[in-house]
Image: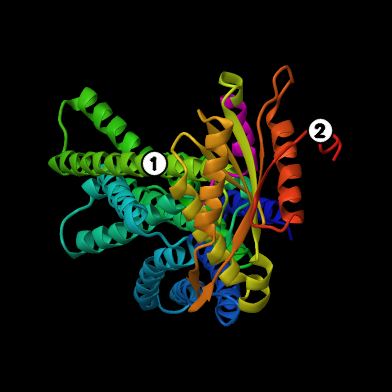
Amino acid sequence: MRLRTALTAGVGLGAAVQLIYPFLPGPAGFALSDVIVASASGYAAWHYLRRARRAQDSPRVRAGYAFGACACTAWSLSNVLMLAGVLINPGLNTPGALLSVAAAVLVPIAVLLAGHRLRGIARARRVIDVAAVSGAVFALAWEFVLSGLGGGASQGYEIGIVGVLVVGSSVALVTLSESRPDRGLTAHQVLAGAALLQAATVMISLRNGLTGKPWFQYGAGTGYVLGAWATAVSSRLRIARPGADMVERLVFGPWALLPYLPVVTAVGVAGWREANDGRLSPVLVWLLLSSFSLVLVRQFLTLITVGRMAVQLEEQKVALAHQAHHDGLTGLPNRVAFHSRAGELLSKRRADVCAMMLDLDGFKPVNDTLGHAAGDEVLIVVAARLAAELRESDLLSRFGGDEFAILVTGLGAQDSGAVAKRLLDRLSEPMTVHGVEVVVGGSIGLAVPRSGQVTSVGLLLRQADTAMYAAKASGKGTVRWYEPDAWPASA
């Protein structure tokens, strides 16, 4: 059964039961509710227990399933005892109520274990959210339910139940605020929604008891049935897997403002109370002050989170820009960056620009005998030696493999040739790679713009490349100039 169909069926069942409650005698209404809730929660307990035994899930998720199974088992047994209390012995209602409280304690634990595991500031935000929401929800419960209770042990018991429900509903609400509804509801999200519905239903029932209304009034009957039905549905849904956008969901998610809803509602109730009778309960005032203080702390942590995200984004942009324009092994500018920067230099100064193409000699034997790791180390050493012999104004790039491109400016032909000879002398010095002494050399081809010729970076590099192959053909370890009279332009 699809999720939407299942939930629609649950709403229909709850509405039907709510309509027939007024026509049933008191015990029959309790019995009907207990049978439905016990059956649905028992169904959920069975499926949660089966999923807790699945080895493919992580231990944390399996523990969440196990707590869910325990909570649903306790809830089912509590309704069985309450049913027996209606039909056989009223004394069974007390242990049934205690089991119901135990279920309310276990549900938020299951929701937290099955949900996303947070760390650092994100975890602190969740704790603060739960505390702030708990204060606001308890303020509402105090205003509409607890303030009307009488004294004695009964009041302490009722306050204890409300306290458990407040914490559970707060955990559920915060869990939903971290959700992505556009990606489909998951098991812990539906279970969190069921916990919210159950907490609201119990509050309504307590309020009905205080005002002398039937226990099912104001939709309480539907709430019990639909909460149990949603719990059963949750036991068949998938568990959400944590993603890289978890922090983004905490800050910018569609439901990220849900924790503020009870706080705003409590403030509205306080304003309404002040406008009507001019007095506020000290409990309400202190609860609201505590919630507001926690909200301020939460916003401060949110600001820190957003600031860190902005810094990380900027660092990633810089890193990506560097990777796009630099060789990953040597750190030198790559072919794209060389063409871009060389084009700028060539547009500013044409008469004193010299392009060089350098190809290593003796590099392949190093790769073949010592391995590619040794070859990579040779390339790193070569890049460092070339950079040390050039000026900051010169441009050095690794074009790929063992081929390097160089652009020097501000030098005449004689000085450019001297630079090329100095580079070869530096390269020919021995180096130690993986404990072995290695000697590599190089061949360099040079090209300069010709008078009256339309020159581009690509043309200069092609000419220098042609000269470099001529240097290799003449015996390697030499420097050759491009000579347009010696080679055709298509060479």
Q: Position of residue 255 (x, y in %)?
A: 49, 42
- Residue span colored magenta: 331-345
Residue 106 within the segment the image draws in magenta: no
**Left or right: where does residue 236 sit relative to residue 189?**
right
Q: Nearer the viewer, residue 391 or 188?
A: 391
- Judge whether residue 179 can be spotted in this image: no
User: What secondary structure do most residues of the magenta stretch adopt?
Assistant: helix
Residue 59 image position (x, y, % from top left) = 49, 77
Residue at position x 18%, y 65% in the image: 153
Q: How crowded is mark 1: few (under 14 residues within 10 Å), some or many (20 or more)?
A: few
The numbered disc on residue 485 is 2
| Residue that label 1 marks | 311
Callout 1 amino acid: Val
- Distance from the alpha carbon under mark 2 to that under mark 1: 57 Å
Asked whether 340 falls inside the magenta stretch, the response is: yes
Nearest to viewer (mark 2 / mark 1): 2
Can you give x and y, in whole percent of width and height, for residue 321 in the image? 53, 40
Q: Position of residue 426 (x, y in %)?
A: 49, 56
